[in-house]
Image (cartoon, helix red, strand yellow):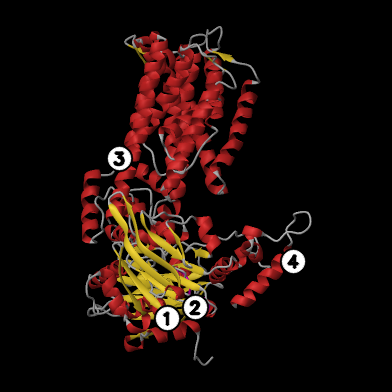
């Protein structure tokens, strides 16, 4: 028994150090960057960073919870792109942009309708992904790779290769600030993160996600409706993507067929770096937050330190590889 | 010491990990052609010892003397070169390749251009099998073999590398009686030719059948080495657990209540070719055993009862009500619990803490959005204490528990969910002797509380010691239900193997 007890303490320490390592990395990054360029620590830049990671964080929260259940969705980027195009198109049509002289009810209805439709589309895409993965019994990675292509093409078909401009309508979600200081998008990010925290920690549903990710067969034998829970997790991903698409298009003021594409990689990088186990069953909201923060900081630091922006993808890719390697080496030791 | 007849000796072998002395000054000797058993409870030092012999661990101090050559430590390649081969508990063969290819995988015979010479490979394998007395066609793919055949191939593979010393780690786990017989014959035939064997098992019956001597480990120390002929099982058990025990397990008075109408009735369960029209009924407070050989359809029957697998027909009624489940969720709602045979594969979430595992079924059944974490902690903690799960904290991951404690977590999960009828499928496989007795005691207490207990087991002494009645299955059929004095190991085995029946 003594050996066992010791082994556990050792393991728990190593888990602690994982979050610690991340924090140390973040602190080091902050110090180095602020020495190179003191502007980094200004309140405006810090708010800027959080505003930048807000969208990423919302996407990562969805993916993170799905990953806890042992599934992955790499189509999130093109989901966001497609929803972005759809929602921008609705706004443009409803408001008759660029002229904008439409009847009052259309003015009133445009934004609420857009928001409702976007979330509905998000839920539908999630449902479609979830049902296909569960029913095909295939690996979620490959199925969602297929959907990545489907949604990417659908986005192009929808906008016919052109872009939708919004001419300053629909700015609140992405550019609005509460009392002229705190960006609205950060509030959304915080809200989603808190919800993820509560769901994973206090909800039966969250516990089922851990159980399914930890051992699907045992979860099923224990009476958990594994199919339903898993599909719901995909729907949650779709809803997070819908919110992300709304904020993103609002911030950009226009939509292209590729606007959201990059979020898939960054969001995956964030949750993996954060320490959500790829195999499922482990990880929490703090892991997701720290991962997002690190990825956001790295992106911002590269810009602040005047490093070639093209180097960013190289760095993000290397971070993913490093994180997965460390993760698999530590789990191999168990 | 007559070193000439010893193939292997160790002198004061020690190994420690931070905080624990895994092996403490072990002197050991193994004769040529001897089968020596290593026994001891989990964590007693057996694994550490064989890993040092196999070269995958280095001792902190002590010496290893193999065929008069002295080593401070070995490494895996050196051990194999010396002729020390280990056959692990899990099958380590390549499923997609043929038997012959698997055997010679480390050094496939090659023809002219470096291509694999299959015919020579097959020939060599046949020759080897003939020598060893194994009856398997070397051209078959490993994935088409039965469990015992795979085990025999693994052993043959080890022997093909000029094995002088074979380490068998739980070789009979999941083998039926027939498989064991084949294995023991193989061991006997080859030890006569000088092969030495270190045999690790939890099953004393087998050890007394096939081994010459038995070494008992406890807390990293050697307690003693005995000639099998001059020691009894009870002596060995006593040394292993370090306290006296008059027998493996003694049953208290039976607690069967009520009559057949009150019972948990299993009616006409059938799936073509798997389970053939099986019916039986278990009364409240009864421990009902199901024996038979591996592959007789017992686990399949249990899975059908629990709603895990499809069935062509079959109803369950309890207290006169039909409770036939559609799926596991439904079975649980109706009070049926199933402790699966494969603890790690389908019983536990290994990477999650104990308390989450215990509360899982109850949580899956209960309505509502959120959980009461404080209550969960409290109640699962009580449950854990009640079943005496040995752990410093219920927040510990289940993966770190011993087999016996893991099994208790599975049981706790079903009890916490309030299951009325419990199906135990091979509940004591991989569980040490001490924990086994605890599990039997728990089953007995549950029966006393009026629960319906069904136990599937391949361990016949266990069935004999624990059950009120024992059903025996063969080829998907329920052959006999033994009661009272009819329940003997011999009877169970006879029915299971179809010996001495008029057909």
Instruction: Answer yes or no: are tags 2 and 3 on the same subunit.
Output: no
Q: Which residue is mark 3?
A: A202
Give percent across and percent down for residue B475.
Answer: 52, 77
Q: What kind of element bears circle 4?
A: helix
Camera-side mark, 4 or 3:
4
Circle nearer the N terminus (4, 1): 4
Q: Are marks 4 and 1 on the same chain?
A: yes
Question: In whole angstroms, how far apart are the C-alphas of marks 2 and 3?
Answer: 54 Å
Residue at 39 percent of width and 65 percent of height: B10
Quickly name the residue at label 2.
B184
The region drawn magenta spans B172-184
Helix, strand or loop status at disc 3? helix
Residue B442 coordinates in the image, percent (x, y): 26, 68
Circle 2 Cα neighbour tier, 10 Å, few/some/many (<14 / 14–19 / ≥20)? some
**In the rendered structure, the residue with mark 3 lies on which chain?**
A
Chain ID, mark 4: B
> Which residue is more in the foreground, A179 or B91?
B91
Q: Chain of mark 1?
A: B
Q: Disc 1 designates what residue?
A: B209
- Asked if labels 1 and 2 touch by Cβ distance under 8 angstroms, the answer is yes
Question: On the rendered structure, is B224 left or right of B498?
Answer: left
Marks 2 and 1, how far apart at CA: 8 Å
């Amino acid at each position: 028994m003594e050996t066992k007890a010791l082994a556990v303490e050792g393991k728990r320490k190593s888990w602690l150090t994982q979050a610690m390592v991340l924090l140390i990395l973040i602190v080091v990054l902050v110090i180095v960057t602020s020495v190179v360029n003191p502007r980094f620590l200004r309140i405006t830049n810090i708010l800027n960073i959080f505003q930048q990671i807000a969208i990423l964080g919302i996407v990562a929260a969805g993916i993170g919870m799905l990953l806890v259940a042992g599934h992955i969705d790499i189509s999130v980027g093109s989901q966001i792109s497609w929803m972005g195009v759809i929602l921008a198109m609705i706004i443009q049509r409803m408001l008759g942009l660029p002229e904008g002289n439409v009847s009052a009810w259309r003015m009133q209805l445009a934004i609420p309708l857009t928001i409702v439709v976007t979330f509905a589309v998000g839920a539908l895409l999630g449902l479609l992904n979830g049902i296909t993965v569960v029913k095909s019994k295939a690996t979620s990675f490959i199925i969602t790779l297929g959907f990545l292509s489907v949604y990417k093409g659908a986005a192009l078909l929808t906008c016919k290769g052109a872009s939708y401009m919004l001419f300053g309508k629909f700015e609140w979600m992405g550019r609005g600030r509460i009392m002229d200081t705190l960006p609205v998008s950060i509030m959304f990010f915080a809200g989603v993160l808190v919800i993820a925290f509560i769901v994973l920690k206090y909800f039966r549903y969250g516990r089922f996600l851990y159980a399914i990710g930890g051992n699907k067969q045992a979860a099923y034998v224990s009476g958990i409706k594994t199919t339903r829970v898993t599909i719901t997790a995909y729907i949650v991903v779709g809803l997070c993507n819908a919110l992300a698409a709304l904020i993103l298009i609002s911030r950009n003021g226009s939509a292209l067929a590729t606007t959201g594409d990059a979020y898939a990689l960054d969001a995956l990088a964030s949750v993996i770096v954060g320490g959500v186990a790829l195999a499922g069953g482990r990880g929490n909201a703090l892991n997701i937050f720290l991962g997002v923060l690190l990825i956001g900081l790295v992106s911002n630091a590269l810009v602040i330190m005047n490093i070639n922006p093209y180097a960013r993808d190289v760095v993000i890719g290397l971070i993913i590889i490093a994180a997965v390697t460390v993760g698999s080496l530590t789990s191999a030791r168990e | 010491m007559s070193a000439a007849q010893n193939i292997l000796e160790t002198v004061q072998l020690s190994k420690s990990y931070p905080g624990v002395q895994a092996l403490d000054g072990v002197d050991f000797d193994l004769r040529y052609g001897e089968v020596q058993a290593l026994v001891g409870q989990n964590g007693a030092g057996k694994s550490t010892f064989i890993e040092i012999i196999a070269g995958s661990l280095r001792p902190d101090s002590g010496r290893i003397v193999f065929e008069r050559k002295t080593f401070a430590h070995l490494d895996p390649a050196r051990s194999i070169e010396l002729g020390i081969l280990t056959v692990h508990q899990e099958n380590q063969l390549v499923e997609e390749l043929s038997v012959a290819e698997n055997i010679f995988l480390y050094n496939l015979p090659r023809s002219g251009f470096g291509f694999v010479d299959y015919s020579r490979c097959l020939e060599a394998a046949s020759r080897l099998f003939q020598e060893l007395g194994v009856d398997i066609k070397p051209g078959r793919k490993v994935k088409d073999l039965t469990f015992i055949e795979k085990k025999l191939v693994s052993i043959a593979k080890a022997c093909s590398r000029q094995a002088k010393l074979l380490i068998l780690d739980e070789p009979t786990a999941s083998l039926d009686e027939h498989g064991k017989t084949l294995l023991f014959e193989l061991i006997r035939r080859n030890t006569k030719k000088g092969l030495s064997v270190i045999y690790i098992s939890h099953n004393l019956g087998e050890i007394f059948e096939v081994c010459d001597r038995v070494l008992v480990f406890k807390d990293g120390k050697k307690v003693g080495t005995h000639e099998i002929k001059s020691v009894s099982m009870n002596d060995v058990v006593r040394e292993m657990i370090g306290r006296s025990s008059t027998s493996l397990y003694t049953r208290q008075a039976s607690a069967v209540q009520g009559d057949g109408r009150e019972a948990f009735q299993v009616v006409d369960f059938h799936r073509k070719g798997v389970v053939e029209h099986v019916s039986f009924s278990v009364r409240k407070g009864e421990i009902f055993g199901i024996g038979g050989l591996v592959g007789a359809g017992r686990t399949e029957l249990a899975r059908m009862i629990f709603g895990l697998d499809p069935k062509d027909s079959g109803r369950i009624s309890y207290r006169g009500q039909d409770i036939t489940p559609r799926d596991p969720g439904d079975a649980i709602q109706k009070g049926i619990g199933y402790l699966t045979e494969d603890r790690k594969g389908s019983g536990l979430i290994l990477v999650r803490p104990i308390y989450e595992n215990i509360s899982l079924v109850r949580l899956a059944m209960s309505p509502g959005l959120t959980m009461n974490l404080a209550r969960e902690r409290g109640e699962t903690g009580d449950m854990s204490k009640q079943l005496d799960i040995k752990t410093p904290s219920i927040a510990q991951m289940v993966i770190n528990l011993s087999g016996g404690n893991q099994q208790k977590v599975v049981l706790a999960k079903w009890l916490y969910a309030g299951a009325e009828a419990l199906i135990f499928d091979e509940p004591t496989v991989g569980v040490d002797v001490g924990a086994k007795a605890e599990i039997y005691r728990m089953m007995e207490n549950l029966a006393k509380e009026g629960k319906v207990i069904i136990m599937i087991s391949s361990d016949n002494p266990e069935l004999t010691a624990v059950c009120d009645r024992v059903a025996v299955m063969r080829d998907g059929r329920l052959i006999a239900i033994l009661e009272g004095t009819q329940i003997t190991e011999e009877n169970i085995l006879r029915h299971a193997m179809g010996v001495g029946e008029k057909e």
